[in-house]
Amino acid sequence: MAKSQMPESYEDHTDWYATSLKSVSQSSEMLYVYNNAVHGFSARLTVQEAELLKKQHGILSVLPEMKYELHTTRTPSFLGLDINADFFPESNAMGDVIVGVLDSGVWPESKSFDDSGFGPIPDSWKGECESGTNFSSKNCNRKLIGARYFAKGYETTLGPIDESKESKSPRDDDGHGTHTATTAAGSVVQGASLFGYASGSARGMATHARVAVYKVCWTGGCFSSDILAALDKAIDDNVNVLSLSLGGSNSDYYRDSIAIGAFAAMEKGILVSCSAGNAGPSPYSLSNVAPWITTVGAGTLDRDFPAYVSLGNGKNFSGVSLYKGDLSLSKMLPFVYAGNASNSTNGNLCMTGTLIPEQVKGKIVLCDRGINPRVQKGSVVKEAGGAGMVLANTAANGDELVADAHLLPATTVGQITGEAIKKYLTSDPNPTATILFEGTKVGIKPSPVVAAFSSRGPNSITQEILKPDIIAPGVNIIAGWTGAVGPAGLAEDNRRVSYNIISGTSMSCPHVSGLTALLKGAHPDWSPAAIRSALMTTAYTVYKNGGALQDVATGKPSTPFDHGAGHVDPVASLNPGLVYDLKADDYLNFLCALNYTSTQINSIARRPFSCETSKKYSVTDLNYPSFAVVFPEQMTAGSGSGASSMKYTRTLTNVGPAGTYKVTVISPSNSVKVSVEPETLAFTRMNEQKSYTVTFIAPSMPSTTNVYGRIEWSDGKHVVSSPVAISWT
């Protein structure tokens, strides 16, 4: 609602909202009243009532409930945080930083929330620890300082929460929320492992930061009215960083609850970090693409969990597994393809009830990946009497290997390996196999590589904003876990663990949230845009040996549409030299450039904001640390329009010592000319700003649809690097 349009007859906007609702429905009640993330309320209405409400005075928009989904100990040393601990001042300022996590709740008994050595809770904190099913306010401490839950939207949509199956409280019965919260800011825990795998000290990125948890995700999903209510409260509670490992909506910014709430958070100085999604490697598969959100994709670590398939013909193939049991199957066993041990058309997928027990009993079964959960396939094999499983990737996942805590001896192999094993199964009259588990191996090269599942650009809402922004570790990540379910997350998994290893951009997002907390502690005066800029312009896209960052989906170098600015480098981001800063009005000018109406802009801005008719707005002027250049196909040199050039304006702010920066353009290709004016920027003092213009000229249609390059400013000590992605549409 347009709060500024409240009639004078009302003393309080809540009364005005209630009257507006009553005018269209006598029975409906407000579920939430929003004061910070947005001005407005949520209620359950019929379609007709919603249409009527749109016509009421002061109503900016009426949005339907949307369902979002979760994007599901080696990391600190891989990122250089252990060796370079001295770089990060463990001052009292670090203990003042509060990371808010919107997810499936928290398991407060996890050792990762130990508050030993923590001082008093910061005075700035306005939040609370809510009680509920299996949870009391005593579950919070000086580390886990807040816990709330939001279920009104969920219950209005799907009916009451079954409290015998999940806790109507901040308690995490799923595991995902505890994993993300401890990844961002878990305390140091010695001797953590999953069944002996990945053993060592488990720790979050910002071990001294505080954690506040907002449970918005339930068995049936995460609903926009609840997410918006949590964002509203988190802003009010005074968190400093917000971490959301969830997504789903891919609509215009003024229709996307996360984008709307994140804008209000950004205005209050809160950086919002969101997962890019797990819909890769398809192009245009991203979620959470608003330019005021930091969008995080996933890469691998230099750690693996090898488990080999040894065939009767003497050949060995490598896979990965987190199975706990005998180190290996003691002998060669009969081997069968699930598709040949089933009467079902999709028997190869090992779905519940599809395997014929007589044909799999005592054998190792090869199952294809797809549709049902990976670990559940092993459960189906076990139920039918199988002795082990080889899980083969299909074309959708290629040769990307994600390790799982299987319920029986099992390993996952890539697509090419799977095809080779199937050939053996069809050609040998008596195929046999065994599985050998090798434990944990580190120093795997190349690493990181971009995960195949990590969602990719271009940005489907605004192609001129390059997304994802950055990648961070998201494959086989160990972190805290719930005591309510086993590591496989299946009802039949009765094992209980303190730490679990899982994968997804859900895991990479809290890495960046925690690193943001470190930067916030070191630079309390930096804006969310300055912090994101520091992370992006110092990210790397080449390995130490000079080779380009690889994409596991293609086996070739990854592109800015896969990795954004590159892989996060925490130590370098502390001292970036220069940053690209942005204020709320810069984003509103960007919305003007998108031709948003004043009503649509007001929905996001929460205040009247009109685009000046005399002013020329351009999306290319948003002061973003990356460049996505889009040429319409007809803009070729022969068109005579001269429209084949694009101008981008950027402003750099000095956050380091005085220095003179010179520009280097790593050219995208011979078909595109890039010129920067001026080529030198001299900074004499802290916070001084200097602008430059980049002109991109495409003289002819290139032979490829996308070309990539970089623009780098350096004073000899700092390198401020921006990716360039050029496409034709």
Image (cartoon, rainbow, N blue to C red):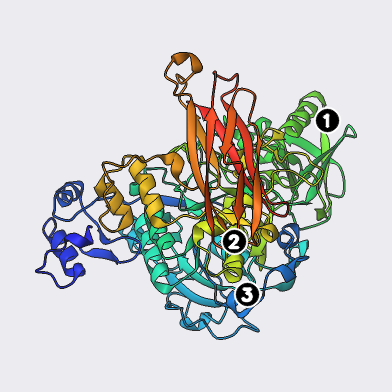
Tag in front: 1 or 2: 2
In terms of secondary structure, where does tag 2 sit?
loop
What residue is disc 1 on? Answer: 430
In terms of secondary structure, where does tag 1 sit?
loop
Which three-letter amino acid code belongs to the residue tagged 2?
A: Val
Are there few (<14), some (14-19), or many (20+) residues within 10 Å of tag 3? Answer: many
Q: CA distance from mark 1 to mark 2?
A: 69 Å
For residue 13, say whether it is visible: yes
Q: Residue at x 12, y 64 (%)?
A: 7
Q: CA distance from mark 1 to mark 3?
A: 58 Å
Q: Residue at x 43, y 60 (%)?
A: 266
Are there few (<14), some (14-19), or many (20+) residues within 10 Å of tag 2? Answer: many
**On screen, residue 238 above or below 630:** below
What residue is disc 3 on? Answer: 208
Screen quadrant of the N terminus: bottom left
Residue 436 locus on image (x, y percent): 84, 48
Left-right relation of 45 to 516: left
Disc sitting over residue 319 in the figure: none
Which three-letter amino acid code belongs to the residue tagged 3?
A: His
Q: Residue at x 46, y 54 (%)?
A: 582
In terms of secondary structure, where does tag 3 sit?
loop
Q: CA distance from mark 3 to mark 2?
A: 25 Å
Q: Are marks 3 and 2 in contact (CB under 8 Å)?
A: no
What residue is disc 2 on? Answer: 655
**On screen, residue 570 above or below 285:** below
Nearer to me, 527 or 404: 527
Nearer to me, 454 or 327: 454
